[in-house]
Image (cartoon, grey):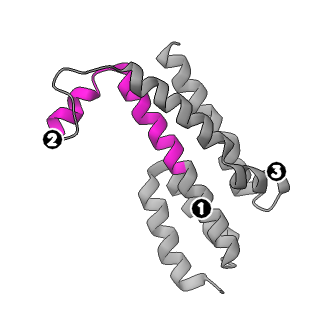
Amino acid sequence: MNPDLVFSIASMLVFPQWLLMVFLPKWKGTTWLLNHQIIPGILVIIYAIFLLSAGDVEGGGFGSLQEVKALFTVDNAVLAGWVHYLAFDLLVGSWILKNSQERAVNHFAVIPCLFFTFMAGPVGWGLYMVLRYFLAKK
C-alpha cells in the first residue's frame, strides 16, 4: 500500500478519539474506546507491516544518531516511526484521561494536557503530572 495514503489514513484514524477525549470524556463511546484501545491496536498492525517492509537499511540502526538518520531515509521506516508516535501519544492521552477521572482532576485543566500530548507527547504528559500533583482530589 502507498505510504502517503497510509500516512493520511493513520493520521486521521486517531483524530476522532482525541476529539472524544476532549469534548465527550465521560460518554460511553469514549469510555469504550479507552477500555478497548481499538485504534492503537489498528496502529500496531500498520506499524508492524511498515516496520517489517522497510527491510534492512544500509547504515541504519539504533546505536547512534547517524544510524537512526539513515533509517529515516526510507519511506516505510519513516511511516512506521510516525505511526509509533501516533499510537503512543494516543495511549498516553488515554491514560491521562482515565487517570484524571479516577483522581477527580477538573477536565478543563486536563484539556491542555491532552492537546500537548497530541502535539508533543512528553510535554503533555509532563504537564499533566504537574497539574495532577496540585489538582488531584483522591
Which residue sits at x=71%, y=50%? 36
Which residue sits at x=73%, y=51%? 20
Main SS, magenta residues: helix
Q: Which of the two residues, 44 or 80, is positioned nearer the viewer here?
A: 44
Q: Tag 3: residue type?
A: Gly
Which residue sits at x=55%, y=78%? 132
Q: In which quarter of the image is residue 97?
A: bottom right
Q: Tag 2: residue type?
A: Ser
Q: Tag 1: residue type?
A: Trp
Residue 125: in sight, yes or no?
yes
What label does residue 95 carry, if any? 1
Q: Distance between the residues labelled 3 and 2?
A: 43 Å
How far across and how far down the image is residue 1, in percent? Answer: 53, 13
Q: Are marks 3 and 1 in contact (CB under 8 Å)?
A: no
Going from the N terminus, do you reach mark 3 or mark 1 first?
3
Q: Say if the magenta span includes residue 23.
A: no
| Total numbered circles | 3
Going from the N terminus, do you reach mark 1 or mark 2 first?
2
Local crowd size for mark 3, using a 10 Å CA cut-off: few (<14), some (14–19), many (≥20) = few
Q: Give the secondary structure at mark 1.
A: helix
Which stretch appears magenta? 64-89
How far across and how far down the image is residue 98, in percent? Answer: 66, 65
What label does residue 29 carry, if any? 3
Q: Quadrant of residue 64?
A: top left
Q: Distance between the residues labelled 1 and 2?
A: 31 Å
Local crowd size for mark 2, using a 10 Å CA cut-off: few (<14), some (14–19), many (≥20) = few
